[in-house]
Amino acid sequence: MKSNRPVNLSLSTVLAVNLKSPVAIASILHRISGVLIFLLIPVLLYVLQESLASEQAFAAVKTDVLGGLIGGFLVFVALAGFIFHIIVGGKHLVQDFGIGESLQGGRLFAWLALAAAAFFIVVALAWMVL
């Protein structure tokens, strides 16, 4: 007798299956970027609050936070998360209108979204470094 009960898969099996699909990669990274943005919002709001206190505080934030390695890295991670989340979220919105819902269309949109996000993240890194 065949059982229709769900089977619990190991994490390695789930990753092996999902990392072959660009749609799954885009979806998983979209969720991770959303969580990352959510976790960085309090830090970014604190930095904004400190920078708006006075001209001296703005100068201090500019040199200490943005001029430092850790602060610059956090700002870049937040910016990269925003860029990725917006681009892949736009892909989801386009697909909600019924465009690219086929298997091939979904894969094409996922590859395009991943490539566009990578391009704009590299542009953002270049903008921050230069």
Image: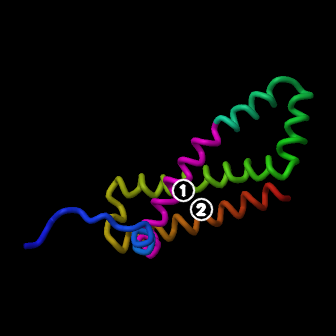
Mark 1 touching mark 2, by CB under 8 A? yes
Judged left or right of residue 25, residue 59 is right
Judged left or right of residue 61, residue 34 is left
User: In the picture shown, does residue 36 fall above or below 100?
Assistant: above
Identify the residue shown where x is 73% and y is 48%.
Answer: 75
Distance between the alpha carbons at the discs numbered 1 and 2 = 6 Å
Q: Which region is colored magenta? A: 18-41
Locate residue 40, reporting x and y percent: 64, 42
Judged left or right of residue 53, residue 13 is left
Indicate the secondary structure of the residue bearing disc 2: helix
Q: Quadrant of residue 49?
A: top right
Q: Main secondary structure of the magenta part?
A: helix
Q: Which label number is shown at residue 117?
A: 2
Of residues 119 and 64, the one drawn nearer to the viewer in this rendering: 64
Of residues 17 and 45, the one drawn nearer to the viewer in this rendering: 17
Identify the residue shown where x is 23% and y is 62%.
Answer: 6
User: In the picture shown, does residue 16 fall above or below 96?
Assistant: below
Locate residue 14, reporting x and y percent: 40, 68
User: In the picture shown, does residue 47 fall above or below 66?
Assistant: above
| Colouring scheme applied when the structure was drawn | rainbow
Q: Earlier in the sequence, mark 1 or mark 2?
A: 1
Report the residue marked by disc 1.
87
Viewport quadrant of the N terminus: bottom left
Locate residue 88, reporting x and y percent: 50, 57
Task: Reply yes or no: does residue 8 show up in magenta.
Answer: no
